[in-house]
Amino acid sequence: MVEDVLKALLRGSSLVLKKRQNYYFISSRNGVPGGLNGRITDIETTDPLGNASVIVKELGKGTMSDENGFYYFDSLPPGKYTLELSFAGYKKTMASGIEIKQDAPNQYDGTLQAENQLQHVTVTGSRRFGRVSNTTDAQLVNEIRTSRNIVSGISNEQIQKSTDRDAGEIARRITGVSVADNFAIIRGLNRRYNITFLNDLIAPATEQDSRAFSLDLINSSLIDKMVVYKSPVPELPGDFVGGAMKISTKNSMLVRQLDIQVSGSYRPNSSFSDFYTYKGGKTDWLGYDDGTRKLPSGFPDILKLSLAGIKERTQYGKMLSNVWQYVSAHHDLDKRLVVNYYDSWKLGKYSRISNLTSVTYTHTVTTNEIERQFGPSTVIAYEVNGKMQERKYGLRTSSIDIQSQNSTRVGILQNFSLTLKDSSRIDFRNFFNQLGNDITNVGILTDAEILDTDQKEVRLYYRQRRLYTGQLSGTHYLFGKRKDPLKWSLGYANTNQQEPDMRTLNYRRTWDKTIGPFQDNPASPWNLTLFEGGQYFPYNRRLFTNTIESGYTGSVDYEHKLPNNFVLKLGSYNEFKNRDFSSREFEVVKGAGYFDQRITSIGSGNINDLYHQDNYKVDGSGFELQEFSGTRYTASNQWNSGYIGLVAPLFKEKLNIYGGTRYDYYRFRMAATGREGTSIVFPIEVDNRDNYILPSINVAWNVSSGMVLRAAFARSINRPEFREIAPFYYFNNITQILELGNPKLKTATFTNYDLRWEWYPQSNKQNEMLSAGFFYKKGKNLIESFTLNDQNSQSGNILMFNNSKEADFYGVELEIRKNLDLFQSRFLRRFSVVLNGSYIKTDVFTPGDATDLSMGNSNRKDRRRPLQGQSPWLVNAILNYDNVRWGSRVSLSYNYSADRISSVGNNDIAGDGIDIPGGGDNENGFPDIMEKGRGVLDFSILQRINRWLQIKASVQDLLNNPVLFYEDRNRNYQYDAETREKDVNGRLKGDNIFLRFKPNSYYTISFNFSFY
């Protein structure tokens, strides 16, 4: 009884109870001089492992850990020893170089990883369930080391320590990778030059204007690891230049376990605050619209509406929902829930099926005050009550927006794995994600052409995205004993993105000098603006868009071992993808009769009353509905490819060569039609075909047991995408810029060179590496977007796609993963660092006539510049503290990405009357839009409370630096703040701020429960 009570009191502490004869002694687990003690824990959960075996190999002396995972040896001779750590169901680990000093206590804490992966399991009968085991740093380092091409990545072990919530935040930790708008930029090449894999399936496009996959769709809790393949190999698609990013989700395994994670997050100015919203549907909380916002049943098509008279158009206007009023609501905390369930069952005598079911739910609200300005700044002085005031405004427009985003995400992952007697394996992986963003934007703006008038724009916007991917794959061994593997895969992917009923309202009022600009004053009423505006920018509009994309894939890969350990590789990848896009845009306009102006003054009233059905009048004195634009295109691509490769290990595998070639056949077809203003656009057809032979070779020289020197050469391509080719105008609601496709785009071609040195120090944790690499790429016909000035559009901005003539890319990448066990201090030895950085230089040549759209743009001069989206500097620094004994993990991480071009301006000048060396002066010019470099500092602490509970607290973006875009007026690719000095045109010198807001720090606490 006494012994049980004492053990209970000391459980989990650094003290141990010993009994000698009839006496009890309490001593420290820290040990005695000449002794060795430590703790053995699970590497995934930090749970202590009781009854683990610890053997000193040189002495043949062993012991077992107690129920709390502690072990100790009373006395060992001085010297260095190797420990063998083992536990039932876990991988055996050898720890070498453990030094025993006679005059001090000695300590070594070890971790073991559960051995429950099914890839190499032969089912012979019943097996004991293990614990969940995800990719560790050591396994990732080993994958990089044994890879046949140049690879970087991040493991689940590091993801767990970080504050990252989705794949986009994780990706920026990888060497040479930055992220913009949730899309990966790899080695300075933006989203269009990279491919994303979701497991072994090319991820479907989630955007209307590109094939890119939005990384924010994948919750970090679902990710096992992320790796980036930077040098092409025969089995990878040849349609990438920067890199192929592979997101591996967690998979089923020989485990029966339930994990539940509940978290709450706080963001200043968003949490426990009011935000703007409007009346939506009953299923908004599930991330999709229930039909409240869609066009009503029986609504006419484009042709029928265009032929309708005023009576019919008035009636059609009444059919649409009458929700225009934004309101305030209150938000407390952001909420997240993750549930993972693992299970495994025998299927017959020699087979086993394993399951992973994962469900995630996220609800967040974010409110930001966003400053926008188009054109350089001008300051005017005015007098109010005898005092002089100043007002700053842009050459085109200036605004302050309050933007609230109410977001909901539901994710479901369902994986099955069937393992057979001969180690063959069949996987069925399913992933579903539903994301709904409800955005309310209220902005007050100033137009330089009408300074005596304030404008107010209200936008009610809902965007829902649905993603499903399913993959059935298998691995079989044709000649037994794991020889000649044959891998096959069948995949289906579907995305559906809808923007139902995006409503925009514009109001005006006389500027009240007593309250200053960008202020809302109930005493100064707003009047609804009712006229058609610019050709593509009607006021008081309603926009409906829908994008559906489906893709079918099939692949097969075969390896055959030849004499002398040579390996022949053969395979094929085939894809058929179809996309259907449609949009309809309506404007509420004045009737054709004598319009009653009184109904446009709303004062502080409800705008829903203004758009009441009674105000749609057949006599023309009220509102009527007019379709302003409608666009539709259907596109498909057929992609067939095959490859052959040879792995040649030479000189006793000191030199490994992997070379081969890939053949790509591609056919792209599109049919488009639409309505722009009062004109019906005739159908436009595109049918492009191409084929390429893409050779590649990767060489790895094993200089020593821990050192590898790699070199690679390859050719790759980059094809135009659906939206880039579609030859019609499209208004982007997010950027508020008109976009125009170009059916004459050419396929870009690249030649790639890589050289990398890698060193893997000998360490017990096997998670250390040091690498330094250099790459060079030569590209022709690069596809980029250009922002130009269009004299025919109201905003003055138009974005189009075109080919730049050629470009050169240079880059240096460094990466260090090191434990600080070189220090004698026990405290410092618990730290590890991950450092990586990249220096990238690009030189893009654009001929003088490359962006001439006959819109008054002067593009006579050639230009050399950095590639759009490329940051010259990328830096990541992570400091980890891991106390195995107490189950504590702390991580401090810093990420920095330098200034980069967000959108390319026209060639000659920065525009708006400002001279540039070698350029000219042109009022219609438009400068590059630059994104200012930004540093992000994150902190997290993970603490094990007991075997079934861990608590994690984290802070994202401690520095809270502003997100800032600027117009680079002197084209030096860095931010020069505006000064009080004026140029010859009376405008402030320096770069004006195009967009700026502060995202605020983000505080999260989560409770992680595990039941097994």
Image (cartoon, grey):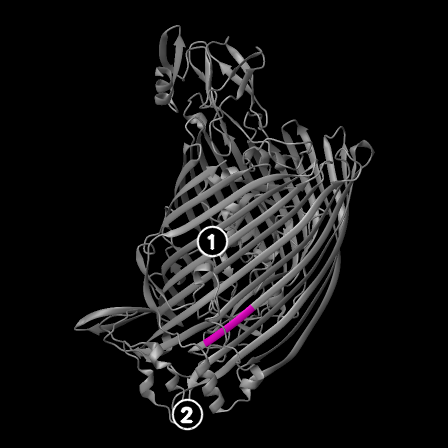
Residue 631 is left or right of residue 688, and the answer is: left
Identify the residue at image location x=48%, y=25%.
821
Where residue 884 appears, as percent x and y from the top left, is 45, 28
Of the two numbered discs 2 and 1 in the rendering, the one whose residue sits closer to the viewer:
2
Count neighbours of disc 2 (C-alpha within 10 A) and say few if under 14, some if 14 to 19, many if 20 or more. some
Query: In the rendered structure, which amino acid carries the disc numbered 1?
Result: Asp
Numbered tag placed on residue 899 in the rendering: 1
| SS state under label 1 | loop
Identify the residue at image location x=74%, y=41%.
476
Residue 667 part of the magenta segment? no
Where residue 374 appears, as percent x and y from the top left, is 41, 68
The span from disc 2 to disc 1 (Cα, nearest Å) is: 53 Å
Whether residue 969 is visible, yes or no, is no
* Secondary structure mainly formed by the magenta segment: strand
Residue 494 is left or right of residue 822, and the answer is: right
* Magenta span: 542-546
Q: Which residue is mark 2?
A: 620
